[in-house]
Image (cartoon, rainbow, N blue to C red):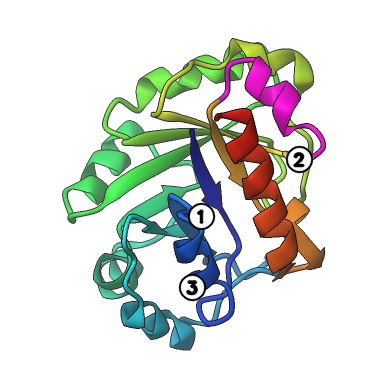
C-alpha cells in the first residue's frame, strides 16, 4: 500500500506526514489553486529529514526554467497535470527528476492513454477537474491497472477507501478530504485516514 497526500503546506504539514510514514508529500504549484504554495516557502523543505518520504512538485505545463531552478533543487518527483507529450516527459526526466504523469479519466478509453508514457515512474489516474474535487467514476475504478506504479485520485475518503481497496487499488492520492477548510489540512483527519488504511492492509 502506498499513499500520497497532496496540497500540503511546506511549514505546517510536512513533519506530521514524515512521522506517519506518508510515501509521497505533494506541494501544488498552480496559481488557480487554493493550495498553491508561495515560492518563498519552498526552501523550508530543505530543513526536513525526509526519511522514507518523497517530495513531489505538482505542476501544470511547467517550463524548463521553473523545473531547473525550483523543482530539481527541492523535490524528488515532479507531477505533470498538463498536456505533456511522451517526448516532454523524457526531457523532464533527463533533468534528474522522477516523474508522475496524471491521466485525466472521463471514460474507459482514457485509461489506456497511460501506455504513451512508459518513461513515467508513476501514473496517476485522476478526474478531469484539476483541484475541483471531482469524483473518480466508480464504474472505472476496477478498470485501471494494478501495481505500485499506478495511483488513483478523486474523492477518496475514510468512508469509501475500504470499498476502493477491495477493487484492487493499493496506491491512493488524497487531498481535499483531509481538510478542515479549503486548502488547510486537518492533522486529525490525516491520522484517522492513515489508521483506517493500516487496518485495511494489516
Q: Which residue is drawn at 69% across and 48% down?
A: 193
Residue placed under numbered mark 1 in the picture: 60
Which mark is in front, 2 or 1? 2
Q: Residue at x 71, y 52 (%)?
A: 192
Q: Any mark on residue 87, and which?
A: none
74 or 163, nearer to the observer: 163
Query: Is residue 199 toward the left or the right of residue 117 in the image?
Result: right
Q: In which quarter of the image is residue 86?
A: top left
Query: Is residue 44 toward the left or the right of residue 6 in the image?
Result: left
**Where, quadrant-wise, is the C terminus in this rendering?**
top right
Q: Which residue is drawn at 60% across and 11% down?
A: 143
Which mark is in front, 3 or 2? 3
Residue placed under numbered mark 3 in the picture: 15
Q: Measured from the top left, where is residue 9 in percent x and y?
A: 57, 74
Callouts 2 and 1 close, C-beta under 8 Å: no
Q: Distance between the residues labelled 3 and 1?
A: 26 Å
Earlier residue among tags 2 and 1: 1
Q: Which residue is drawn at 34% across and 83% down?
A: 47
22 or 81, nearer to the observer: 22
Q: Residues within 10 Å of mark 3 (few under 14, many from 20)?
A: some
Q: Residues within 10 Å of mark 2 (few under 14, many from 20)?
A: many
Q: Measured from the top left, where is residue 62 in percent x and y?
A: 41, 59
Q: Measured from the top left, where is residue 163 in percent x and y?
A: 74, 22
Residue placed under numbered mark 2 in the picture: 155
Residue 25 higher or lower than 46, as above or below: above
Residue range in magenta is 159-169
Q: Measured from the top left, where is residue 196 in percent x and y?
A: 68, 41
Amino acid at each position: 500500500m502506498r499513499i500520497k497526500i497532496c496540497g500540503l503546506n511546506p511549514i505546517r504539514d510536512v513533519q506530521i506526514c514524515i512521522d506517519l510514514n506518508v510515501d509521497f508529500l505533494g506541494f501544488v504549484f498552480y496559481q488557480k489553486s487554493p493550495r498553491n504554495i508561495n515560492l518563498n516557502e519552498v526552501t523550508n523543505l530543505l530543513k526536513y529529514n525526509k526519511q522514507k518520504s518523497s517530495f513531489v512538485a505538482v505542476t501544470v505545463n511547467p517550463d524548463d526554467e521553473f523545473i531547473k531552478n525550483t523543482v530539481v533543487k527541492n523535490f524528488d518527483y515532479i507531477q505533470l497535470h498538463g498536456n505533456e507529450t511522451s517526448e516532454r516527459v523524457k526531457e523532464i526526466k533527463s533533468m534528474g527528476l522522477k516523474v508522475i504523469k496524471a491521466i485525466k479519466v472521463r471514460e474507459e478509453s482514457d485509461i489506456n492513454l497511460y501506455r504513451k508514457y512508459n518513461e513515467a515512474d508513476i501514473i496517476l489516474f485522476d478526474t478531469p477537474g484539476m483541484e475541483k474535487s471531482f469524483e473518480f467514476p466508480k464504474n472505472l475504478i476496477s478498470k485501471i491497472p494494478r501495481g505500485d506504479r499506478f495511483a488513483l485520485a478523486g474523492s477518496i475518503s475514510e468512508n469509501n477507501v475500504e470499498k476502493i481497496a477491495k477493487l484492487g487499488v493499493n496506491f491512493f492520492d488524497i487531498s481535499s478530504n483531509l481538510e478542515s477548510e479549503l486548502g488547510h489540512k486537518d492533522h486529525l483527519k490525516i491520522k484517522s485516514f492513515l489508521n483506517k488504511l493500516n487496518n485495511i492492509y494489516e
